[in-house]
Image: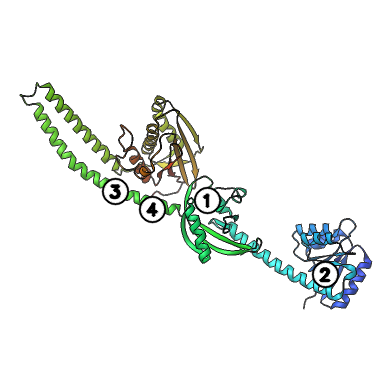
Amino acid sequence: MRQVKVLLIDDDEDDYILTKGVFDQISSSYELSWVNSYEKGIGSILKKQFDVYLVDYRLGKGTGIDLLNEAINSGCEQPIIILTGKGDLAIDEQAMNIGAADYLIKDEIEPSSLDRSIRYSIKEASVTKALKDSERKYRAIFEQAKDPILVSDYFGKIYDINSAGLKFLGYERSEILQLNTSAIFKNAEDGEKFRELMERSGSLSDFECELISGRVEACYCSLSSFIQTDMVNVKEVYHTIIHDLSYRKNIEERSVSLGKMSISEHIAKGLGEEIRDPLSTINLALDELAAEPAIVYNETVQSCLEIIKSNCDRVNQLMQNFISSTETKTLNLQRHNILTVIEEAISDVEDLIVGHNIKLTTQFHQSEQKVLLDKPKIKNALISVINNAVESMQSYPKMIHITSTADRGMYEIGVEDNGVGVDPKNQEKIFEPFFTTKKRAGGLGLTHAQRVLTTHNGSIKLKRLAQGSLFLIRIPIYHEGTLWF
């Protein structure tokens, strides 16, 4: 059996002789060494040459507490037992709070008590080291995990979050530790249901919900969680892994949009054919009527015929616009600086903005990175959204704020107005062809914008504000070497 190496750090040689006598009475399982100064003692501790250290409280240059504090701060994992000439409760508590394994009074040391103290100290140090090693492994896995991980309790108090979680939710660590989980659930009902399921079964998988980030964005997620006892706080906590389903959700939404677009295109073309033939017949008949000798000089009849013909032409033009808005056209994709596209779109509607006495402000993310897109189509889509914002404002002051940011491989353009906003019951209809609540509006601008962005693998969404609306346009950032499918 290997001998336990013990180092006595004491500047009094008589104390060493007395201590050696006590060890001689214990057993041969201990090997006692001695150094007589603070410096030699801390040097031996830093070199990790011994299994346990007996440190006298008085060491000349400093105290045993000073040495203990320095050793602990230097990462010493071996047990340190403090020795004093007489009992002092304050020193005892101070030593134990810093990390001493035990506190012994020299005059009361007996072979059996010293042996027990050393054995227990070594055992406790071994357990503590194992726990620390486990904690380090857990912390490494926790911090390096690609998925966000959140540690909270039944009441929503947040105890910890990994780096991926901070990045995903867009918070600083100090900020999120001050929050309650109720602040990150978009719907309070989801938070209640999550807690109910956790308390009922102790774990759950694939709980789908929406979380709110620090950027006030809704993220569609799947939560997998289990309950574990936190030994530090002595309570049960939820360890929750957050899976970002935004990409899957976008794919699903895009698939639905493409399906609707395909149906709309089919209906539009069929309807166009059905309407075009009757309109041609009506126009032909009108031309025949207008040439009749009996009415050729009748101004009233000729005026009525012109009105009919004009409205027929208008119906035909509306039909052409409808078909055009539903057609999936080939994209001429080239790399462009998105800021240039935005600025050109704003320039094209500048007269309209000035004419309506609108205050336009911008805040752009400056970047030289280019985006793969069909410039004329994206520019027209932006113009349609800006026009929609202009038409939505009825009272002064009229304001439009346009922003651009880059995040998670996407460029996001925001067009915000302080107009009348969108009625909640109409929110799902605003991208449908011919749907409009505005006078003298065709109802195809947003339909066209959605189609263009969908074919670019992007999206356009409406966010209702307390006053006005915010349209969020997202376009993928494509890096060199990325293929377009």
Identify the residue under disc 3.
262
Q: Nearer the viewer, mark 2 or mark 4?
A: 4
Number of callouts: 4
Relative to 468, say whether 15 is above or below. Answer: below
Q: Position of residue 95 (x, y in %)?
A: 80, 61
Q: In the visual, does 422 lie left or right of 71?
A: left
Name the residue type under label 1. Answer: Ile
Residue occupying the point 84% across, 61% down: 89
Q: CB of mark 2 within 8 Å of CB of mark 3?
A: no
Kindly tell me whether residue 244 is visible in this rendering: no
Q: How is the image coloured?
A: rainbow
Q: CB of mark 1 within 8 Å of CB of mark 3?
A: no
Q: Position of residue 340 (x, y in %)?
A: 44, 34
Name the residue type under label 3. Answer: Ser
Q: CA distance from mark 3 to mark 4?
A: 15 Å
Identify the residue under disc 4.
252
Q: Nearer the viewer, mark 1 or mark 4?
A: 1
Closer to the chain start, of discs 3 and 4, is 4
Q: Position of residue 459 (x, y in %)?
A: 40, 45
Closer to the chain start, of discs 1 and 4, is 1
Closer to the chain start, of discs 2 and 4, is 2
Q: CA distance from mark 2 to mark 1?
A: 54 Å
- Please tell me the numbered disc located at residue 184: 1
Q: CA distance from mark 1 to mark 3?
A: 37 Å
Most extreme residue toward the left is 294
Identify the residue under disc 2.
6
